[in-house]
Image (cartoon, rainbow, N blue to C red):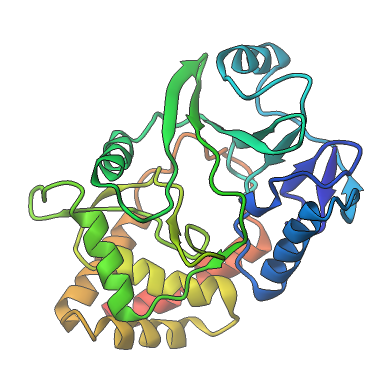
Amino acid sequence: MRATWLSRRRLLLPGSGRLPGGLWAHAACRPLTVFANTLSGHLTRLSVRLVPSSRTDLTLPFDDQLMAEILDRVPGLRRDHDWVVLTPSDPRRSRIMILGLDGMRRQTVFVRATLDEPNLLALRLLEQLQQTRSGLVYPMVEDVFSLDEWWITVERPLPQASHRPARLDARSLHELAKEIQALAPPRDGLVCGHGDLGPWNVRRYADGRLGVLDWEYATWSTRATDELWYALTLPLATTDQPGKRIGQTAIDALGEVYGEHEVREAAEFLVTQRTRAEPAEIREGVERSKSLLAFEDRLVQALSLITD
């Protein structure tokens, strides 16, 4: 296998290094990475055969027998065709994502394998999205099944088109949050939320459409939680601004649609979420990367500014 230089060794291609359709499946956030990712995607259409990469070993988190069973169960994932493999940026996570390709290296299916059971709320919200005929780009789940301790989710591939973090103003973000909350009635004073509405999951496609990806952390939360998470994580992931400055910017942005109490309530909810038990896929004894530690340190600073 070869790991591209675009994605910090997280996007693995077939051993030939030939550029396949699927590079845009990597949700780059930093401006330089977004540019490189977009350029490589366009080069695919020009039939460029090579992509800058380096040799690397890929160790699947499960044995060959289980991989064979996945291949047997998933239409569109074939032994005689290439795949694009995405591994987590967080080294503690035991999961893998596979984008199947056809003989022309076009996307056929997206497969996610994780140790965590499916999020039933997420599946419910995605099903409701299909019924509402929303204009959003979102994953369409075709199958969910378990093999041994692993849970496999099979999705239709997303559009093979350039996308980047969507930069939404406070009003547009509020409309998006309301659209998500309308997918299920409130429960116990809480609304349904995406749960990870960060720039890696809120994408603007080249044709102008808005994409909301990776719903696996959908949860019941306060009204402003998704919006506060977006307002915090967009600058955290795309800039080097200090945490307290990011926190103040988030306060100012959400102040256009929420009162001070609601913003603080959302921040307290996020702090509580961070203290809950880790998902099953988090491996003990594996250290966070330096970039992830720096991200979390600035996040703590931003949340502290809001809750104090």
* Quadrant of the image occupied by residue 55: top right
**What residue sits 72% from the left and 15% below the top?**
64
* Viewer-proximal residue among 12 and 261: 12
Q: As drawn, is 110 to the left or to the right of 275?
A: right
Name the spot of residue 248 as percent of width and height, x first. 37, 87
**What residue sits 36% from the left and 77% below the top?**
304
* Viewer-proximal residue among 79 and 68: 79
Up-down relation of residue 92 to residue 5 (above or below): above
Residue 89 in sight from this viewpoint: no
Quadrant in the picture for the N terminus:
top right
Up-down relation of residue 83 to residue 75 (above or below): below
Quadrant in the picture for the C terminus:
bottom left
* Quadrant of the image occupied by residue 74: top right
Up-down relation of residue 30 to residue 74 (above or below): below
**What residue sits 65% from the left and 65% below the top?**
291
Name the spot of residue 56 as percent of width and height, x first. 86, 42
* Viewer-proximal residue among 292 and 4: 4
Circle count: 0
Residue 119 in sight from this viewpoint: yes
Q: As drawn, is 168 to the left or to the right of 32?
A: left
Up-down relation of residue 19 to residue 46 (above or below): above
Residue found at the far left of this picture: 188
Q: As drawn, is 203 to the left or to the right of 249?
A: right
Name the spot of residue 208 as percent of width and height, x first. 48, 67
Name the spot of residue 215 as percent of width and height, x first. 39, 46
